[in-house]
Image (tube, grey):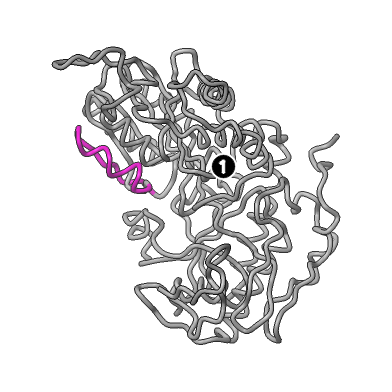
Amino acid sequence: MSRWDFAMPAAVLTTSTQTVAPGADTPRAHTAGVDPACGPLARVSGDDLRVPLVQGGTARYANFDYAASAPALAQVTDRLQDLLPYYASVHRGAGYASRVSTECYESARGSVARFLDACDDQVVVFTRNTTDSLNLLAACVPGETVVLDIEHHANFLPWTRNGRRVVTAARTVAETLIRLEAELAARPAALLAITGASNVTGEVLPVAEVAALAHRHGARLLCDAAQLAPHRRISLRDSGIDYLAFSGHKLYAPFGAGVLVGRRDWLDAARPYLAGGGAVREVTADDARWACAPQRHEAGSPNVLGAAAIAAACDALAAIDADAQLAHERALTERLRSGLCAIAGVRTLRVFADCADCADCVGIVAFTVDGAEPGQVAAYLSAEHGIGVRDGRFCAHPLLARLGVGAALRASIGLGTTAEQVDRLVEAVARFVEAGAGWNYAQVGGHWNPVPETRPLTVGATAGAAPCVG
């Protein structure tokens, strides 16, 4: 089977049917017969979701907010449905359900370790998310940490406790690496902490090269892989990464769980991240003997469903052909970027001049529309076209300031994205530039909302209640 022959629903090769009011979005006709690489690569939750439009009617939801929270893979939700009847206390029960839950929780570490090709001396610690993982590691680092000024806040703010040194990223990746090396050569540091892929622009840094650079000067490397892990295969063994963190909710797994994987010695030497049951071997009235990592940093009842979801996502992603995933992402990202760049007044954002094409980026495109507030454009896309994008500063304020914008829009691509969805987004942005919004919008509580809001914004037991507009 060639890299282009993976199976997909026949529907992606034709335009989708929508029930919409006059003026609502319709797919561009040229999506018929698109390259198979532009179809969905996997089933995700909500891939058949239809959403109401303010002008009446519905549209099939086009999700371009994968970088914030990716929808769960079907394999993940299936795994959780299988596990739920056995959901019970972990590590603390003799009953059969507890034994099953404990085995599921502990075996999840193996799935994560295999997915990342972890080294023998690296342990898997389950946390709440990437931010939690990096704060945990920050309490373990025995010295200063060097970071770039383009980081997500999760990889920028925690390092102040032992001394944070900020290096200004240059206009190219090559020059940025020279600056990092100069900083580490000038004064030793314990850790160099970098993003694997920018959550704003999608640009990928050469982590293996950065790891070698750090090691030359006696530092270890932490990779914030929240955006990298869902898009690229990572080998901790081959890359030389010492510590890596990611979030389950960005890796197609629901529930609040994340991962910190890294070398044991710092984790064993540090005080427990939380003091409590599960992190100890023995407690007296005057003292405590702490367990080794990973249990040392996992006090309290663990999130077995979150760990199981991450493990299922790791197993599912590992089973996808890497070439097929890369081809899918590059085709759609280039389609999106070129489509937006063809619209007058739309500017896509980049940090590095030598990240010249989509080969150096994951599926994230940030952009601005001249003369328009990003929040208003995002509200318009959602309310009138059933398209979800992100707007704001993306928890990367220093980077947005460097790029010279107060806020931006961000469209991010995942395994369930199709060419038809990309074309709908481009067409909707072009329509906004040409004719403006077809509905009134105003800021309510700091957020842009359609006025009036005609869509019900509640589901399930509360459906039918007054729409939330705050």
Question: Which amino acid is tagged 1?
Answer: Ala
Residue visible at 37% across and 18% down in the picture? 293
The magenta segment: 152-170
In which image quadrant can residue 186 be found? top left
Left or right of 167 in this view: 246:
right
Residue visible at 65% across and 51% down in the picture? 45
Residue visible at 34% across and 15% down in the picture? 292
| Residue 238 appears in the figure | no
In which image quadrant can residue 23 be found? bottom right
| Nearer to me, 236 or 306 | 306
Q: Secondary structure at mark 1?
A: loop
Please state the horizontal and vertical placement of residue 294, each as a whole percent of the image. 39, 21
Residue visible at 53% across and 70% down in the picture? 457
What is the quadrant of the C terminus in the image? Answer: bottom left
Left or right of 284 in this view: 33:
right
| Nearer to me, 126 or 264 | 126
In which image quadrant can residue 144 be found? top left
- In this rendering, the answer to whether 461 lies above or below 372 is above
What is the quadrant of the N terminus in the image? Answer: top right
| Residue 159 among magenta residues | yes
| Residue 440 among magenta residues | no
Please state the horizontal and vertical placement of residue 277, each as a whole percent of the image. 32, 24
Q: Which residue is mark 1?
A: 253
Please state the horizontal and vertical placement of residue 94, each as a whole percent of the image. 49, 18
Q: Please, which residue is most extreme toward the left here?
A: 286
- In this rendering, the answer to whether 84 lies above or below 18 is above
